[in-house]
Image (cartoon, rainbow, N blue to C red):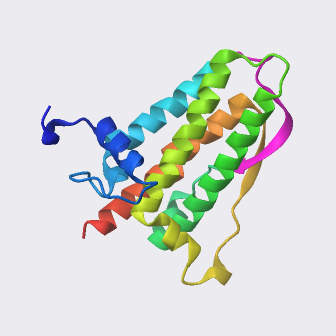
Amino acid sequence: LSLLECPAWLWLLLSLLSLPLGLPVLGAPPRLICDSRVLERYLLEAKEAENITTGCAEHCSLNENITVPDTKVNFYAWKRMEVRQQAVEVWQGLALLSEAVLRGQALLVNSSQPWEPLQLHVDKAVSGLRSLTTLLRALGAQKEAISPPDAASAAPLRTITADTFRKLFRVYSNFLRGKLKLYTGEACRTGDR
């Protein structure tokens, strides 16, 4: 297998292995999230997690309301936003979603009989959100989100609550398909200019 024939998942793995050390991976695309196949993998995992909870009642209650980002997108307003403003909204949403999934994971672990298929998908979601955070950081989303040009005018993040894993995974899936995909598409386009 030559260096140029490596599949996208291998590049992702190699990139993630080098991040804690701060070492560049030779030949790895610096903006891996701009490869649509990478984001599609996370979208597929999110959809699978959502589907596993269809018809699940007994094992799928969170037993509390967890705050998650509102995934509704006003496309008219979104297109008028600067990429920097989009980065703020996506970064804040991803942080809140990560906290929510970690809280769901803790609740599941502390339950009397965790359902194994659900546990597997919650663990995958935690891992996927960590990887997406790393990929967005490489794209520069964190820098843009930390120092927006006009922080005083930034709108607060809209939120909703989830009381079941089904709703939590639906929000996860919708967030990736909506705001995250819109932002990365625009950030990758503007970065290529």
Residue at x 58%, y 36% (from the top left corner)? 125
Screen quadrant of the C terminus: bottom left
Residue 131 vs 146, above or below: the answer is: above
Q: Residue 49, image x and y in percent?
A: 58, 27
Asked whether 35 falls inside the magenta stretch, the response is: no
Q: Nearer the viewer, residue 115 or 165?
A: 115
Q: Which residues are magenta?
A: 53-69
Q: Nearer the viewer, residue 163 or 119?
A: 119
Residue at x 66%, y 24% (from the top left corner)? 119
Q: Residue 95, image x and y in percent?
A: 64, 55
Q: Nearer the viewer, residue 12 or 121?
A: 12
- Tell me which corner region of the image, top left, top right, bottom left or bottom right, holds residue 65: top right
Asked whether 57 falls inside the magenta stretch, the response is: yes
Residue at x 21%, y 36% (from the top left corner)? 6
Q: Is residue 62 left or right of residue 14?
A: right
**Residue 115 visible to an observer of this rendering:** yes
**Residue 53 visible to an observer of this rendering:** no
Q: Is residue 3 left or right of residue 187?
A: left
Q: Residue 167, image x and y in percent?
A: 71, 34
Among all residues in the image, which is located at the extreme front? 21
Residue 152 vs 53, above or below: the answer is: below
- Tell me which corner region of the image, top left, top right, bottom left or bottom right, holds residue 159: bottom right
Residue 83 vs 97, above or below: the answer is: below
Residue at x 26%, y 51% (from the top left corner)? 28
Q: Residue 5, image x and y in percent?
A: 15, 36
